[in-house]
Image: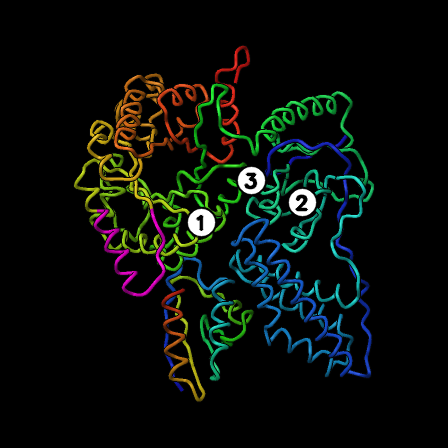
Amino acid sequence: MKRFSYTITDELGIHARPAGLLAKRASEFKSTVSLEANGKQGNAKQILSVMLLAVKQGQTVEFSVEGEDEEQAAAGLLSFMEENL
Amino acid sequence: MIRVSGKCVGKGIAIGRLYLYEKENAVLNKRLVEDEKSELDRFEEARKEAARELSELYEKARKEIGGEEALIFEIHSMMLQDESFLDSIRDAIFQGHVNAEYAVHQAGESFAEAFASMEDEYMKARSADVLDIASRLVRILTGFGGGSLDSAEPVILLAEDLSPSETVQMDKNKLLAIVTRKGSANSHTAILARSMNIPALVQTEVELKPEYHGKRAVVDAGEGTLLIEPAEELLEAAVKKKMEADRYRSGLEELKGKENITSDGRSVDIFANIGSASDARLALREDAGGIGLFRSEFLYLGRGEPPSEEEQYEIYKEVFSCMAGKKVVIRTLDIGADKQVDYLGLKTEENPAMGFRAIRLCLSDPELLRTQLRAIYRAAVYGNAAVMFPMIISEVEIRQVKKLAGEVRESLLREGRAVGEVEIGIMIETPAAALISDILAGEVDFFSIGTNDLTQYTLAIDRQNEALEPFYDPHHEAVLRLIRMTVENAHRAGIWAGICGELAADTSLTEAFLDMEVDELSVSVSSVLEVRRAVRAIGQKGEAG
């Protein structure tokens, strides 16, 4: 399993559009991608699940990636976060 | 008579019959099903149909309202693929043995509740999106409701609120005005009303009584009022006011498609000033000949970091494509200490108007400009592109920005990227630039005269200071001479010159500008047709503008 954390810099936090883009990106990988923020857990592949975490600017999201392509998935998702959030 | 007030979001007056719009609630009976498999099939079919509708709505909204607004339907499509939402529906069908519509309804309610209970206002508002999806599915499953306007004549729509899908699906030929109890100035209702140019009120303090349906009413968006069964004299006053507004507006409407030409055959381009991609659509609707000033600073405001190259590229591309070959002039970042942009780390200045701003900032932080130019050169493939640099006062500065632009172009080509042609121009907005415009003209493809700053710097009058108003003369001969000089110097060097400040829309000066042979006037979107009218009136005896 690969873990990493990312602190949101986007002013709006993870709102609907980036949540949707994140879900899309995460779904491209075989690995399961779970998120933890605000004491809640979510599935990165599901837009509603990501949105319900209600992550705001300055808050940190913990990613746990597990599966056969976890190396690539973790790297891909980290760069996604850096570019978009 | 009933008089209620609301918040105005679209201009104008409408007189007509009220149409009480209620969401048709499908009869939602809970049924126990025995054949779960076929119930699940019904649901999956409905889901496919919903996905198809959403992609149609996305296209419709993108064409009619704009990309940013259309996004909501893309998000709905994604929500419709959310496994946790789908699972809770499938579970209800398989384990709860309930009918599909009931399962969808329950899932919609429970997700909506989860959003509604969040603290964040933005997230709270997302519960409406979940409900919109659920009701779409229920409608498909039951065949009920659909937000259609069942009326032969156009009506004033009175509703609790409108969902994004209802707003876009509404037959626009049947709408005189929209009045909602909920909604905000940024709601979909508001955006639709503005894009359609119809009066609208939101947050209106009105009860939705069934007896209102079909009653005569007046919506005066300027006043922010809705009158139901207005008294005779008020109705007459409204009719008169509407006729005047219509006459004025239809006079302008008739000018669409006409040339900006005086009766003695002189012509000028009338372009629009915009601040976002969606403004470009409005500019086209008002028949602007191009975009004379795209204020790119709006992309940089209200955020934690400068917009990325990709982000800017997408926006410029949208504007270029929208204008379909008509010229679009993008002004590079024009920002200074008077704007709150924390990430630029600008120090507070005593006199920001004369301070570290615009091109001065960009030349000190070339990466900022490089990113913007990369986006512009790449997007330029999609249209007729021009870029102009603000606050230029010397030839040296022009050489610096041109060098930078050249480098950007070269490096994009080296990376194998497609690059479009971009005209390069400067703003003439200081007396210094106007006075040496003969020298500057040899370096660029065009001039655009920014009269707001040019006036303030020439007269040494701060535009923000109300106490100076008695001394402020926007038609000061000094400013007019500088404009004339700039245009003459441009033409001597064989380049074009336009005006993009507020003065460009001042119809008392239109004739003077034509006499100076100004090539282009770039004005606010709402002034395009008024300036055209002024141009066409020149030379006509006895007919005032």
The residue pinned by badge 3 equals: B285
At horizontal 77% and vertical 45% (from top left) the residue drawn is B20
The chain letter under disc 2 is B
Q: Residues within 10 Å of mark 1 (few under 14, many from 20)?
A: many
Q: Which residues are magenta?
A: B401-422
Tell me where residue B374 appears, x and y as whole percent.
32, 56
The residue pinned by badge 1 equals: B320
Q: CA distance from mark 3 to mark 1?
A: 15 Å
Q: Please tell me whether the stretch drawn in magenta is mainly helix, strand or loop.
A: helix
What coloring was used for the rendering? rainbow
Front position among marks 2 and 3: 3
Question: What numbered label is drawn on residue B247?
Answer: none
Left/right placement of residue A77 relative to residue A52 reads: left
At horizontal 50% and vertical 32% (from top left) the residue drawn is B528
Above or below, B377 relative to B135: above
Tell me where residue B292 appears, x and y as whole percent.
40, 38
Q: Amino acid at mark 3?
A: Arg
Depth check: give the residue in front, B77 or B186.
Answer: B77
Q: Amino acid at mark 1?
A: Phe
The answer to whether tags 3 and 1 share a subunit is yes
Front position among marks 2 and 1: 1
Q: Amino acid at mark 2?
A: Arg
What is the secondary structure assignment of the residue under circle 1? helix
Magenta run includes residue A48: no
Above or below, B270 relative to A77: above
The answer to whether tags 2 and 1 share a subunit is yes
